[in-house]
Image (cartoon, grey):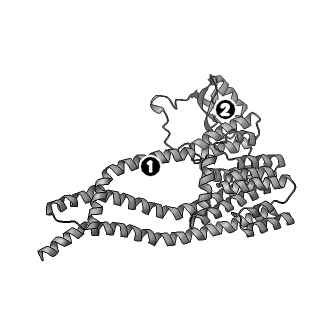
Amino acid sequence: MAAATKAPARTGHTTFEYSARDRSGKLVKGTLEASDSGAVLTRLKSQGLAPVSVEASKVGKGMQMEINLPGSNRVGLKDLALMSRQFATMVSSGLSLIKALAILAEQTESKKLAETLGEVRAEVETGVALSTALGRHIDVFPPLMINMIRAGEVGGFLDQVLVQLAENFESEVKLKAKVKSAMTYPVVVFVIAILAVVGMLLFIVPVFTKMFSDLGGELPLPTKILVFLSAAMKWVAPIGLVLFIVWAITWKRVKHNDAVRNVVDPLKLKLPIFGTLTQKIALSRFTRNLGTMLRSGVPILQSLDIVGGAAGNVVVQRAAVDVMESVRSGQSLAGPLAQHPIFPAMVVQMMSVGEDTGALDSMLHKISDFYDQEVEATTDALTSLIEPLMIAVLGGIIGAMIIALYMPIFGVFNLIN
């Protein structure tokens, strides 16, 4: 069974590709960082492997250099969900962490995740705790995952924590898929409408403009407007494209800044229709993550600090900070939430009941399930409403342009008659 074991790169060390056979006779392949091939052989033997071949890696040299496309080094939530589910299954079946990490590194489709798991495995082999090894790769593994695994290690129920993590990530993936499916259609139609309008103004209207100038006479007002827009589009389109690219690059860099989020996030909640959807998504994510962490034994203050930042909206994050201050002073968890409009009375009351009965984690998951259903219903309603509206808007724009183009021709026909 193949295993990609890649330790962190160190000065003076070389990457070696190896193949070896384990105790069952299966062929194992992977990579190791070492000073020389002898060190690789020693390490493989210490792992109970019988080396077959060891040679310096050629990846990254000459014609074999790897080409990384934009986004190819990103580990998605779906990758983490699948990894957590497989990891939980293998750990609960009695496989060692090292063996499980090797299998995960081989099976994952994400190259970045495979490399990271190889590094994690190499660190675990040296005696480092799993949560500590994961914590050294915060660009791949979120704080929620690291802290839950740490709690599972301390409490001796790592397999249960991994199952809860898998369920949490799978619910998050499902939620994102619902929203994405609802937004895909209107975005695609909007882009098509923009491209169609720009295409007609740049390529079709100029042909009619030349014909109108040959015919002479006074053009109708709608046609004059269309001709003016066509002439302006020749310099507006390039400028608009450059401005869009600059805006996209700038937004990608500043969208996570606190100053920007303090302005944008509250505005998201005030948008018609979409503001309610944004609120439901944030509440679902907050309650699910908090319930999962509390159920895993993570301290409540630490949980609130993590889930506040993971909620995706600074308004929820502020509420989490207020709750942390309330808990530190020995007061209730649900009390401060009543002061934040983003939390409906139902959520506050259910959390209060969960505190009183000692079943806060279960109550939080019930709230999350409720808002998941609300998000699904809202996205379905949006899809059914937006589809005909977008078709009507697109048809109206193209139809108005065609009518404006043919109005002078109709005038010529009337004069001939």
Crowd around label 2: few <14 · some 14–19 · many ≥20 (10 Å): some
- Left-right relation of 317 to 323: left
Crowd around label 1: few <14 · some 14–19 · many ≥20 (10 Å): few
Depth check, front residue: 266 or 309:
266
Instruction: Tell me which amino acid carries mark 2.
Output: Ala
Looking at the image, which residue is at 39% across and 60% down? 192
Looking at the image, which residue is at 56% across and 67% down? 272
Percent position (x, y) of residue 400?
32, 69
- Left-right relation of 129 to 330: left
Percent position (x, y) of residue 54?
59, 28
Q: Quadrant of the C terminus?
A: bottom left
Depth check, front residue: 406 or 361:
406
Percent position (x, y) of residue 409?
19, 69
| Residue 267 sits above or below residue 127 on the image | below
Q: Earlier in the sequence, mark 2 or mark 1?
A: 2
Quadrant of residue 314 in the image? bottom right
Is residue 93 at least partly visible in the picture? no
Residue identified by numbered label 2: 50
Depth check, front residue: 402 or 289:
402
Looking at the image, which residue is at 68% across and 47% down? 142
Percent position (x, y) of residue 354?
82, 65
Gap in Å between the C-alphas at discs 2 and 1?
57 Å
Farthest residue in the right direction? 330
Farthest residue in the left direction? 416
